[in-house]
Structures are given as C-alpha cells and as structure tokens.
Image (tube, helix red, strand yellow):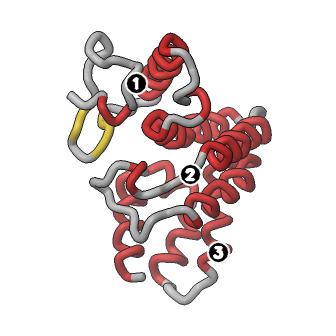
Amino acid sequence: MYESFLEFGYVVKRFGEVQKAAQNPCEDFLFFPFCDTEAIKEALLQAYYGAGYQNIAVYIAVVEEHAEERFDVICDPEKMIVLDDRQASKCDAWWDGAEKAAKDDGRAFARIRRSRIQLRYYESMRSPGEFGRLNSPIDKWEEGEKLYDDMTRMGVTCISQCRTMKAKDKPLFILPANKWKA
C-alpha cells in the first residue's frame, strides 16, 4: 500500500490539473491512509471527468479485474492487461457513454477524450475493434493515423518511458502504436 501512496503522489505532482481537480480527496488519501479510499476515488473521478465519471469508474473496475499481477511503468500495456474483443468493445462503449454524458462540459469532455487515448493505444497493440485483424490494411492505416494525430494534438510526445514518438513522416500506421518509437 505504501508504494501506491508514493506512486500516486508522483502522479499528483506531475499532473497539476489532476492535483487541482482533486485537491481535498488527494490530501485525505495521502495523509489519512485508513480513510475510505473508494469514496476518495469516486470524488477524484467526479471532479476530473464530470458527468462522465461513472462510465470511467466501470472501465477502471474492468481494467483492474483483468490486470496482471502488477502495473509497471516500463512495461507495455498488452503485457499488463488482457482483454478480448468483446471486453474491449464494452470498454469503448463506456468511453462513448462518458463522452456523451460530459458533452456539455468542455473541460471534462476534453479530459475524457485525452484519457481515452490510452485505450486506443492499447487496442492498437492488441488489435480488437477498429484495429482488428479482419479490417483492411487501409482501414488499419487510417485508424493508426487518426490515433497518431490525436496523440500529437493532445500533447503526447512519448510512447513509453523515455521513448519519443517518430515524426509523422516515419511511422507506418499499420503497425501497433508501441512500434512508433523513434
């Protein structure tokens, strides 16, 4: 549990808007480790994602349920979480629901779109849905290019720990996103 506090503290310090959105719940969590963590988690999600938080809470529960033993900063997501096509489709539906619920709140909607990048990145590697093996190479290329454009527009510069993305003229978008490393 102590490691979780340290990792969460690092995330809060690194991402100022998360810290600002959840200042009081985070303070409770960091200074009173025996508090109701589920209530704090819900308050954090609600403060950050607005009306779409309930869908994201369900998504997080599914990811936690299907996670391997431990998340690792350096490990690629497909080694940490295993979802089949049906489960990945449900995850997409929850993110769609979150976007729909927060459509009138510009900040929450933007945060949801930016956070959804991690699921799209994962799907690019695992090949369900729009990145599926049954889709044509042209469709996969177009989805990969959309993902790349969204990632760069939203400020993503690294794909994994200290590995920057290739310039747009270099990646082959038909490849999984984790192969776009420079």
Instruction: Give, as a three-letter code, the residue at label 2.
Output: Leu
Which numbered disc, 3 or 2, marks the residue that appears first in the sequence? 3
Q: Which residue is drawn at 35% across and 53% down?
A: 14
| 61 or 34: nearer the viewer | 61
Quarter holding residue 171:
top left
Residue 81 locus on image (x, y percent): 48, 56
Q: Do the residues labelled 3 and 2 touch (CB within 8 Å)?
A: no
Mark 3 Cα shell of 10 Å, populated few (<14), some (14-19), many (≥20): few
Instruction: Using the image, tell me which numbered label, if any, was put on residue 152.
Output: 1
Secondary structure beneath dot 1 equals helix
Q: Around disc 2, counting alpha carbons within 10 Å, would you say few (fewer than 14), some (14 to 19), or many (20 or more)?
A: some
Residue 38's label in the rendered image is 3
The secondary structure type at the circle numbered 3 is helix
Task: Write down the quadrant of residue 70 in the picture.
Answer: bottom left
Residue picked out by circle 2: 83
Q: Position of residue 179 (x, y in %)?
A: 30, 31
Instruction: Find residue 129 and name its label.
Output: none
Left or right: 96 as drawn, with respect to 66: right
Which dot, 1 or 2, sits closer to the camera?
A: 2
Q: Do the residues labelled 1 and 2 touch (CB within 8 Å)?
A: no
Kind of residue indicated by mark 1? Thr
Specify whether 87 is left or right of 150. right
Q: Which residue is drawn at 54% across and 89% down?
A: 34
Q: Position of residue 46 (x, y in %)?
A: 69, 56
Q: Quadrant of the C terminus?
A: top left
First in sequence: mark 3 vs mark 1: 3
